[in-house]
């Protein structure tokens, strides 16, 4: 429950969900009138390396297959100078992150009647990574791990 809340409350996940739910392109891809990002979000946030990846459920496609979006992000670390303290020297600097949503793709729906079967993912946008992907990133390769937790 705590991990799910941490993933869902991350600014990148919230921004991606908002974009996905409002996108006409996503509705056309799914063949559905409504996009719902409710459900279990998979992925990770690596604060040390400044990378994050999410696998966000999109509901069902028109043919009944489960649809997901893959979102990748990286952080740009900013230094915020310490504020002057009333009782003495300034408080030390602290780091703050500005996150960039750099990759958003739709995975072909799994199961169902298969209007998308065998198709590659639909990339909505992608910027070149300036930080290597973390070893914690969910794999794109087929796996025995259930897709809902990758």
Image (spheres, rainbow, N blue to C red):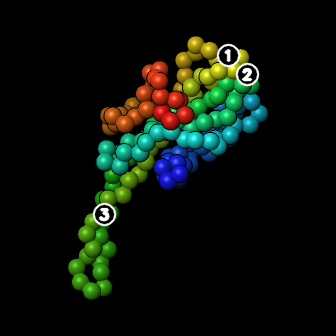
- Say what secondary structure mark 2 lies in: loop
- Say what secondary structure mark 1 lies in: loop
For label 3, the crowd category at 10 Å Cα-Cα, with few meaning under 14, some 14 to 19 and many 20 or more, is few
Q: Is residue 117 visible?
A: yes
Q: Which residue is mark 3?
A: 94
Q: Nearer the viewer, residue 50 or 38?
A: 38
Q: Which residue is at 62% across, 38% downward?
A: 20
What separation in Å lies between label 3 and label 1 (alpha carbons)?
Answer: 50 Å
Rendered image: mark on residue 114: 1
Which of pointers 2 and 1 lies earlier in the amino acid sequence?
Answer: 2
For label 2, the crowd category at 10 Å Cα-Cα, with few meaning under 14, some 14 to 19 and many 20 or more, is some
Residue 23's place in the image compared with 8, above or below, is: above
Q: Are marks 2 and 1 in contact (CB under 8 Å)?
A: yes
What separation in Å lies between label 2 and label 1 (alpha carbons)?
Answer: 6 Å
* Place of residue 24 in the rendered image (x, y in percent of width and height, measured from the top left): 69, 33
Q: Is residue 76 visible?
A: no
Q: Which residue is mark 2?
A: 63
Q: Nearer the viewer, residue 8 or 84?
A: 8
- Say what secondary structure mark 3 lies in: strand
């Amino acid at each position: 429950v705590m991990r799910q809340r941490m993933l869902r409350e991350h600014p990148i996940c919230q921004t991606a969900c908002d974009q996905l739910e409002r996108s006409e392109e996503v509705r056309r891809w799914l063949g559905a009138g409504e996009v719902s990002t409710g459900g279990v979000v998979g992925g990770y946030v690596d604060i040390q390396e400044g990378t994050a990846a999410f696998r966000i459920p999109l509901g069902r496609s028109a043919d009944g297959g489960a649809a997901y979006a893959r979102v990748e992000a990286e952080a740009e670390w900013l230094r915020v100078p310490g504020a002057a303290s009333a009782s003495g020297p300034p408080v030390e600097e602290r780091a703050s992150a500005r996150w960039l949503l750099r990759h958003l793709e739709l995975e072909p729906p799994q199961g169902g009647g298969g209007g998308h079967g065998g198709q590659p993912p639909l990339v909505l946008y992608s910027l070149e990574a300036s930080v290597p992907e973390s070893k914690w990133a969910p794999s794109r390769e087929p796996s025995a791990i259930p897709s809902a937790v990758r």
